[in-house]
Amino acid sequence: RKEVEQDPGPFNVPEGATVAFNCTYSNSASQSFFWYRQDCRKEPKLLMSVYSSGNEDGRFTAQLNRASQYISLLIRDSKLSDSATYLCVVSLEYGNKLVFGAGTILRVKS
Amino acid sequence: DAGVIQSPRHEVTEMGQEVTLRCKPISGHNSLFWYRQTMMRGLELLIYFNNNVPIDDSGMPEDRFSAKMPNASFSTLKIQPSEPRDSAVYFCASSFGSSTNEKLFFGSGTQLSVL
């Protein structure tokens, strides 16, 4: 089983739609969780950290479910500029090692 | 703020040649990471340094790969000899601190093609 698994998509949605991605992780001792965004042919950039109580940043909401070992990202009122690959990132229990999921492709169309 | 600087942006070489990728982390950051990204395997951590010391190199594919960090402002990833299966985008990233809660800042990457 992969350490971090994501549905690769692509998710094709119209502007204004709400879309949600899930990500599952295998190590129950994982402590830190993040969503990164990667545009085509660019480097990954931190979108948001994921906190145990859930957190929101504008149109983006991240949640963590430790019991089921998954994190989610919800995007409301999708914009064309949200089109990108969204990478789920999980820390392993030891050291300073972050493991990236393969990413979920989002395409927002007008 | 110059960000993480990688060079070269693109490298095309022939099988068997030595390849050296370079990275300058953000000033003041004390952790540095080398990642490789391919369509098949996604982003894989190759090695990371903390305060210039290699902490975990378990992701380095084989002995053909080596990485150094002689000082806080420079790191290299060397492949010798290179093989076609090494073709990928290689990213360098840095962060401040040694906790996994720290934000990673990535460089623009080096697109490596081994013919």
Image: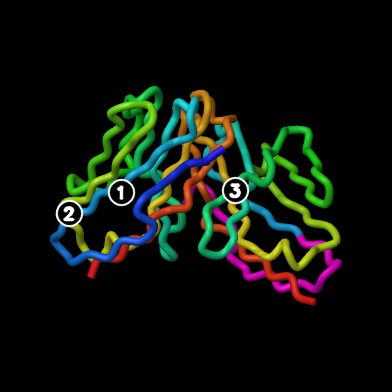
- Residue A33 is labelled as none
Q: Chain of mark 1?
A: B
Q: Nearer the viewer, residue B26 or B99?
A: B26
Q: Give the Cα distance between marks 2 and 1.
A: 10 Å
Do marks 2 and 3 share a chain?
no
Tell me the kind of residue under disc 2.
Glu
Q: Position of residue A85 (x, y in %)?
A: 61, 61
**Residue in the image at 38% along x and 35% along y:** B48
Q: Position of residue B96 (x, y in %)?
A: 53, 27
Decide whether residue A62 is among the magenta residues. no
Span colored in magenta: A2-19
- Give the side of residue A62 with respect to residue B28, left or right: right
Tell me the kind of residue under disc 3.
Lys
Helix, strand or loop at label 3? It is strand
- Residue A45 is labelled as 3
- Give the side of residue B86 with respect to residue B42, left or right: left
Q: Position of residue A94 (x, y in %)?
A: 46, 28
Do marks 3 and 1 share a chain?
no
**Residue in the image at 47% along x and 47% along y:** B107
Which of the two discs, 3 and 1, sits closer to the camera? 1
Q: Nearer the viewer, residue B9 or B97?
A: B9
Q: Residues within 10 Å of mark 2 (few under 14, many from 20)?
A: some
Q: Which residue is mark 2?
A: B18
Which residue occupies the extreme front position in the image?
Answer: B1
Q: Chain of mark 2?
A: B
Decide whether residue A8 is among the magenta residues. yes
**Quadrant hosting residue B76:** top left
Mark 3 touching mark 1, by CB under 8 A? no
> Which of the image's four quarters has the C terminus of chain A?
bottom right
- Residue B21 is labelled as 1
Q: Chain of mark 3?
A: A
Helix, strand or loop at label 2? It is loop
